[in-house]
Amino acid sequence: MRLGLFFSVSLSSFVNSCSRRYYAAMPERQSQPSEACGSPRPAIDTPHGPLTFGGRCLVMGILNVTPDSFSDGGLYAETGKAVARAIELAAEGADVIDIGGESTRPGSDAVPPEEQIRRVVPVLREARKNGVAVPISIDTQSAAVAAAALDTGADIVNDISGVRDDPAMPGLLAQRRVPFIVMHMQGTPRTMQESPRDHNVVAEVAAFFEARAEALTAAGVDVSRMIVDPGIGFGKNLEHNLSLLRSIRTFTARWPVCVGPSRKRFLGELLNEPDPTKRLLGTAAVIAHCAIAGVAMVRVHDVNEARQLMHVCSALATTTGER
Protein backbone atom coordinates (compact mmCIF):
# COMPACT_ATOMS: atom_id res chain seq x y z
CA MET A 1 0.00 0.00 0.00
CA ARG A 2 1.35 3.42 -0.89
CA LEU A 3 2.21 5.44 2.20
CA GLY A 4 0.25 8.41 0.87
CA LEU A 5 -2.94 6.28 0.79
CA PHE A 6 -2.43 5.31 4.42
CA PHE A 7 -1.84 8.97 5.21
CA SER A 8 -5.11 9.98 3.55
CA VAL A 9 -7.17 7.32 5.36
CA SER A 10 -5.85 8.23 8.81
CA LEU A 11 -5.47 11.98 8.27
CA SER A 12 -8.52 13.31 10.09
CA SER A 13 -7.98 11.36 13.30
CA PHE A 14 -4.25 12.14 13.25
CA VAL A 15 -4.71 15.90 12.92
CA ASN A 16 -7.58 15.94 15.39
CA SER A 17 -5.33 14.23 17.93
CA CYS A 18 -2.50 16.72 17.27
CA SER A 19 -4.90 19.64 17.61
CA ARG A 20 -6.37 18.42 20.89
CA ARG A 21 -2.97 17.80 22.42
CA TYR A 22 -1.72 21.19 21.30
CA TYR A 23 -4.62 23.14 22.76
CA ALA A 24 -4.58 21.04 25.92
CA ALA A 25 -1.04 22.29 26.49
CA MET A 26 -2.07 25.89 25.76
CA PRO A 27 -5.51 26.37 27.35
CA GLU A 28 -5.29 30.15 27.20
CA ARG A 29 -5.54 29.92 23.39
CA GLN A 30 -8.73 27.89 23.42
CA SER A 31 -10.89 31.00 23.51
CA GLN A 32 -9.24 32.23 20.28
CA PRO A 33 -9.60 29.31 17.85
CA SER A 34 -9.40 31.51 14.77
CA GLU A 35 -5.69 32.06 15.48
CA ALA A 36 -5.03 28.46 14.55
CA CYS A 37 -4.78 29.42 10.93
CA GLY A 38 -2.87 32.65 11.45
CA SER A 39 -3.57 36.25 12.35
CA PRO A 40 -5.11 38.34 9.57
CA ARG A 41 -2.49 40.13 7.46
CA PRO A 42 -2.65 42.09 4.23
CA ALA A 43 -2.35 39.89 1.17
CA ILE A 44 0.85 40.24 -0.84
CA ASP A 45 0.10 40.60 -4.54
CA THR A 46 1.95 38.71 -7.27
CA PRO A 47 1.36 38.66 -11.04
CA HIS A 48 -0.15 35.18 -10.66
CA GLY A 49 -2.45 35.85 -7.71
CA PRO A 50 -2.17 37.09 -4.15
CA LEU A 51 -0.53 35.38 -1.22
CA THR A 52 -3.37 35.53 1.27
CA PHE A 53 -2.38 35.05 4.90
CA GLY A 54 -4.56 34.61 7.96
CA GLY A 55 -6.79 31.85 6.62
CA ARG A 56 -5.69 28.34 5.68
CA CYS A 57 -1.95 27.78 5.90
CA LEU A 58 -0.59 27.91 2.35
CA VAL A 59 1.27 24.98 0.80
CA MET A 60 4.48 25.56 -1.16
CA GLY A 61 5.45 22.60 -3.35
CA ILE A 62 9.14 21.81 -3.78
CA LEU A 63 10.58 21.33 -7.26
CA ASN A 64 14.32 20.70 -7.23
CA VAL A 65 15.76 20.70 -10.75
CA THR A 66 19.08 19.45 -9.45
CA PRO A 67 21.08 16.22 -9.70
CA ASP A 68 21.95 16.12 -6.00
CA SER A 69 19.24 17.40 -3.64
CA PHE A 70 18.98 15.34 -0.46
CA SER A 71 15.57 13.74 -1.07
CA ASP A 72 14.68 13.99 -4.75
CA GLY A 73 17.96 14.85 -6.48
CA GLY A 74 17.97 13.76 -10.10
CA LEU A 75 14.24 13.00 -10.34
CA TYR A 76 13.45 16.29 -12.10
CA ALA A 77 16.82 17.30 -13.54
CA GLU A 78 15.47 16.97 -17.10
CA THR A 79 13.30 19.85 -18.26
CA GLY A 80 10.43 17.67 -19.46
CA LYS A 81 10.19 15.78 -16.17
CA ALA A 82 10.44 19.00 -14.19
CA VAL A 83 7.64 20.64 -16.18
CA ALA A 84 5.45 17.57 -15.74
CA ARG A 85 6.09 17.73 -12.00
CA ALA A 86 5.21 21.45 -11.89
CA ILE A 87 1.92 20.69 -13.61
CA GLU A 88 1.31 17.87 -11.14
CA LEU A 89 2.08 20.05 -8.11
CA ALA A 90 -0.36 22.71 -9.35
CA ALA A 91 -3.04 20.05 -9.93
CA GLU A 92 -2.49 18.69 -6.42
CA GLY A 93 -3.24 22.13 -5.00
CA ALA A 94 0.09 23.84 -4.42
CA ASP A 95 -0.49 27.50 -3.60
CA VAL A 96 3.11 28.25 -4.59
CA ILE A 97 5.73 26.19 -6.44
CA ASP A 98 9.33 26.71 -5.32
CA ILE A 99 11.83 25.96 -8.10
CA GLY A 100 15.54 25.70 -7.36
CA GLY A 101 18.59 24.81 -9.43
CA GLU A 102 21.08 24.55 -6.57
CA SER A 103 21.11 21.87 -3.88
CA THR A 104 21.53 23.34 -0.41
CA ARG A 105 21.73 20.04 1.46
CA PRO A 106 24.38 19.91 4.22
CA GLY A 107 27.85 19.67 2.69
CA SER A 108 26.81 20.83 -0.78
CA ASP A 109 28.91 23.13 -2.94
CA ALA A 110 27.67 26.34 -4.54
CA VAL A 111 26.40 26.14 -8.12
CA PRO A 112 27.44 28.98 -10.48
CA PRO A 113 24.61 31.35 -11.45
CA GLU A 114 24.88 30.50 -15.13
CA GLU A 115 24.33 26.80 -14.37
CA GLN A 116 21.37 27.58 -12.14
CA ILE A 117 19.88 29.69 -14.94
CA ARG A 118 20.44 26.86 -17.43
CA ARG A 119 18.52 24.53 -15.15
CA VAL A 120 15.59 26.66 -14.02
CA VAL A 121 14.72 29.08 -16.83
CA PRO A 122 13.56 26.46 -19.37
CA VAL A 123 11.42 24.83 -16.67
CA LEU A 124 9.81 28.14 -15.75
CA ARG A 125 9.18 29.04 -19.38
CA GLU A 126 7.60 25.70 -20.26
CA ALA A 127 5.61 25.49 -17.05
CA ARG A 128 3.97 28.82 -17.80
CA LYS A 129 3.37 27.80 -21.43
CA ASN A 130 1.68 24.63 -20.20
CA GLY A 131 -0.79 26.43 -17.98
CA VAL A 132 0.85 26.51 -14.56
CA ALA A 133 -0.81 29.64 -13.21
CA VAL A 134 0.01 29.61 -9.49
CA PRO A 135 2.74 31.87 -8.07
CA ILE A 136 6.25 30.46 -8.50
CA SER A 137 9.20 31.25 -6.27
CA ILE A 138 12.81 31.00 -7.33
CA ASP A 139 15.01 29.37 -4.70
CA THR A 140 18.38 31.09 -5.11
CA GLN A 141 20.96 33.24 -3.37
CA SER A 142 21.98 34.85 -6.68
CA ALA A 143 20.52 38.13 -7.94
CA ALA A 144 21.35 37.15 -11.53
CA VAL A 145 19.40 33.91 -11.19
CA ALA A 146 16.51 35.68 -9.47
CA ALA A 147 16.34 38.32 -12.21
CA ALA A 148 16.36 35.71 -14.97
CA ALA A 149 13.62 33.75 -13.21
CA LEU A 150 11.47 36.82 -12.57
CA ASP A 151 11.81 37.72 -16.25
CA THR A 152 10.56 34.23 -17.17
CA GLY A 153 7.47 34.11 -14.97
CA ALA A 154 8.60 33.69 -11.37
CA ASP A 155 6.89 35.86 -8.76
CA ILE A 156 8.80 35.41 -5.48
CA VAL A 157 12.45 35.24 -4.43
CA ASN A 158 13.35 32.63 -1.81
CA ASP A 159 16.87 33.40 -0.55
CA ILE A 160 18.28 30.96 2.00
CA SER A 161 21.12 33.36 2.80
CA GLY A 162 18.70 35.91 4.22
CA VAL A 163 19.60 38.28 1.36
CA ARG A 164 23.23 38.37 2.51
CA ASP A 165 25.15 36.28 -0.01
CA ASP A 166 24.86 38.46 -3.12
CA PRO A 167 25.35 42.24 -2.66
CA ALA A 168 23.16 42.83 -5.72
CA MET A 169 20.11 41.09 -4.25
CA PRO A 170 18.78 44.01 -2.13
CA GLY A 171 18.88 46.29 -5.17
CA LEU A 172 16.97 43.74 -7.24
CA LEU A 173 14.30 43.36 -4.55
CA ALA A 174 14.00 47.13 -4.21
CA GLN A 175 13.61 47.53 -7.98
CA ARG A 176 11.22 44.65 -8.62
CA ARG A 177 9.12 44.97 -5.42
CA VAL A 178 8.38 41.26 -5.37
CA PRO A 179 7.60 39.15 -2.30
CA PHE A 180 10.73 37.57 -0.87
CA ILE A 181 11.65 35.03 1.79
CA VAL A 182 14.46 35.75 4.25
CA MET A 183 15.81 32.56 5.84
CA HIS A 184 18.09 32.19 8.82
CA MET A 185 21.19 30.04 8.32
CA GLN A 186 24.50 29.75 10.11
CA GLY A 187 27.42 29.55 7.69
CA THR A 188 26.86 28.13 4.22
CA PRO A 189 25.27 24.87 3.07
CA ARG A 190 28.75 23.37 2.86
CA THR A 191 29.66 24.21 6.48
CA MET A 192 26.39 24.84 8.32
CA GLN A 193 26.11 21.46 10.06
CA GLU A 194 29.75 21.13 11.11
CA SER A 195 29.23 22.69 14.53
CA PRO A 196 25.89 24.53 14.82
CA ARG A 197 25.79 26.79 17.89
CA ASP A 198 23.21 29.08 19.41
CA HIS A 199 22.96 30.00 23.07
CA ASN A 200 19.31 30.99 22.66
CA VAL A 201 18.27 30.01 19.16
CA VAL A 202 14.78 31.54 19.31
CA ALA A 203 16.04 34.94 20.47
CA GLU A 204 18.93 34.90 18.03
CA VAL A 205 16.75 34.04 15.04
CA ALA A 206 14.19 36.69 16.03
CA ALA A 207 16.96 39.28 16.32
CA PHE A 208 18.32 38.20 12.94
CA PHE A 209 15.00 38.92 11.24
CA GLU A 210 14.75 42.35 12.85
CA ALA A 211 18.30 43.16 11.78
CA ARG A 212 17.66 42.01 8.22
CA ALA A 213 14.47 44.06 8.02
CA GLU A 214 16.35 47.16 9.20
CA ALA A 215 19.20 46.63 6.75
CA LEU A 216 16.89 45.92 3.83
CA THR A 217 14.74 48.95 4.61
CA ALA A 218 17.88 51.07 4.53
CA ALA A 219 18.64 49.58 1.10
CA GLY A 220 15.23 50.65 -0.21
CA VAL A 221 13.50 47.28 0.02
CA ASP A 222 9.80 47.21 0.94
CA VAL A 223 9.83 44.84 3.92
CA SER A 224 6.02 44.67 3.97
CA ARG A 225 6.65 42.07 1.24
CA MET A 226 9.03 40.07 3.44
CA ILE A 227 8.30 36.54 4.63
CA VAL A 228 10.62 34.92 7.18
CA ASP A 229 11.83 31.34 7.44
CA PRO A 230 13.56 30.14 10.65
CA GLY A 231 15.69 27.77 8.58
CA ILE A 232 14.87 24.36 10.03
CA GLY A 233 17.92 22.15 9.44
CA PHE A 234 20.15 25.00 8.27
CA GLY A 235 22.96 25.28 10.81
CA LYS A 236 20.87 23.81 13.63
CA ASN A 237 21.00 20.64 15.67
CA LEU A 238 17.98 18.62 16.76
CA GLU A 239 17.26 20.68 19.85
CA HIS A 240 17.64 23.96 17.94
CA ASN A 241 15.04 22.78 15.41
CA LEU A 242 12.63 21.62 18.10
CA SER A 243 13.04 24.84 20.08
CA LEU A 244 12.23 26.93 17.01
CA LEU A 245 9.15 24.86 16.25
CA ARG A 246 7.93 24.92 19.85
CA SER A 247 8.30 28.73 19.87
CA ILE A 248 7.10 29.39 16.33
CA ARG A 249 4.47 31.85 17.61
CA THR A 250 7.37 34.17 18.51
CA PHE A 251 7.76 34.68 14.77
CA THR A 252 4.14 34.43 13.59
CA ALA A 253 3.23 37.27 15.95
CA ARG A 254 5.54 39.56 13.96
CA TRP A 255 5.87 38.21 10.40
CA PRO A 256 4.29 35.96 7.81
CA VAL A 257 6.30 32.77 8.38
CA CYS A 258 7.30 29.99 6.00
CA VAL A 259 8.55 26.71 7.53
CA GLY A 260 10.28 23.95 5.56
CA PRO A 261 10.50 20.73 7.61
CA SER A 262 9.78 18.29 4.80
CA ARG A 263 11.65 14.96 5.09
CA LYS A 264 14.54 16.61 6.92
CA ARG A 265 17.30 15.01 8.94
CA PHE A 266 15.94 16.04 12.34
CA LEU A 267 12.85 13.94 11.58
CA GLY A 268 15.12 11.05 10.70
CA GLU A 269 16.79 11.46 14.09
CA LEU A 270 13.46 11.54 15.93
CA LEU A 271 11.99 8.62 14.00
CA ASN A 272 15.18 6.59 13.56
CA GLU A 273 14.39 6.65 9.84
CA PRO A 274 17.38 7.11 7.49
CA ASP A 275 15.28 7.19 4.30
CA PRO A 276 13.97 10.74 3.69
CA THR A 277 11.08 9.46 1.57
CA LYS A 278 9.73 7.54 4.58
CA ARG A 279 9.35 10.58 6.82
CA LEU A 280 5.91 11.63 5.57
CA LEU A 281 4.02 11.26 8.83
CA GLY A 282 6.80 12.98 10.75
CA THR A 283 6.55 15.85 8.29
CA ALA A 284 2.76 15.82 8.73
CA ALA A 285 3.05 16.16 12.49
CA VAL A 286 5.28 19.22 12.12
CA ILE A 287 3.17 20.99 9.52
CA ALA A 288 -0.01 20.32 11.54
CA HIS A 289 1.69 21.98 14.50
CA CYS A 290 2.74 24.87 12.25
CA ALA A 291 -0.74 25.37 10.84
CA ILE A 292 -2.30 25.38 14.31
CA ALA A 293 0.34 27.86 15.50
CA GLY A 294 -0.42 30.38 12.75
CA VAL A 295 2.37 29.72 10.24
CA ALA A 296 1.52 31.34 6.90
CA MET A 297 3.07 28.74 4.59
CA VAL A 298 4.77 25.36 4.72
CA ARG A 299 7.27 24.10 2.15
CA VAL A 300 6.79 20.41 1.35
CA HIS A 301 7.50 17.64 -1.14
CA ASP A 302 4.10 15.91 -0.70
CA VAL A 303 1.58 18.55 -1.72
CA ASN A 304 -1.57 16.44 -2.01
CA GLU A 305 -1.20 15.08 1.51
CA ALA A 306 -0.30 18.50 2.91
CA ARG A 307 -3.37 20.10 1.33
CA GLN A 308 -5.60 17.44 2.90
CA LEU A 309 -3.99 18.12 6.25
CA MET A 310 -4.45 21.88 5.93
CA HIS A 311 -8.09 21.40 5.00
CA VAL A 312 -8.67 19.47 8.22
CA CYS A 313 -6.67 21.94 10.30
CA SER A 314 -8.73 24.79 8.88
CA ALA A 315 -11.98 22.97 9.69
CA LEU A 316 -10.79 22.29 13.23
CA ALA A 317 -9.84 25.93 13.69
CA THR A 318 -13.46 27.01 13.22
CA THR A 319 -14.81 24.42 15.66
CA THR A 320 -15.66 25.74 19.12
CA GLY A 321 -17.11 22.59 20.62
CA GLU A 322 -15.54 19.97 22.87
CA ARG A 323 -11.83 19.56 22.36
Image: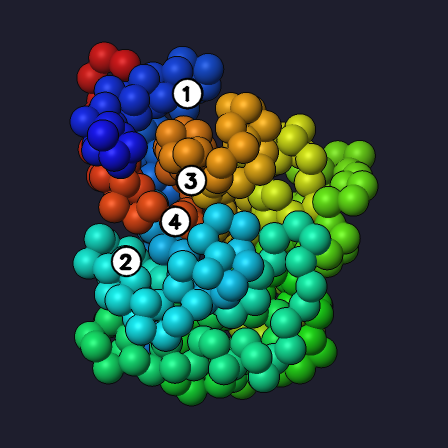
User: Which quadrant is the C terminus positioned in?
Assistant: top left
Q: Position of residue 235 (x, y in %)?
A: 70, 46
| Residue located beneath label 1 in the image | 22
N-terminal of the pair, mark 1 or mark 2, is 1
| Residue located beneath label 3 in the image | 277
Crowd class of label 4 (few under 14; some 14 to 19; many from 20; radius 10 Å): many
Q: Position of residue 87 (x, y in %)?
A: 24, 65
Between the C-alphas of marks 4 and 1, the distance is 25 Å
Crowd class of label 3 (few under 14; some 14 to 19; many from 20; radius 10 Å): some
Mark linked to residue 89? 2
> Do callouts 3 and 4 mark residues in contact (Cβ within 8 Å)?
no
| Residue located beneath label 4 in the image | 301
- Kind of residue at disc 4: His
- Kind of residue at disc 1: Tyr
Between the C-alphas of marks 1 and 3, the distance is 26 Å
Tell me if residue 22 can be seen.
Answer: yes
Point 70% across, 70% down: residue:
165
Between the C-alphas of marks 2 and 3, the distance is 17 Å
Dot in front, 3 or 4: 3
Image vertical order of residue 266 relative to residue 91, above or below = above
Dot in front, 1 or 3: 3
N-terminal of the pair, mark 2 or mark 3, is 2
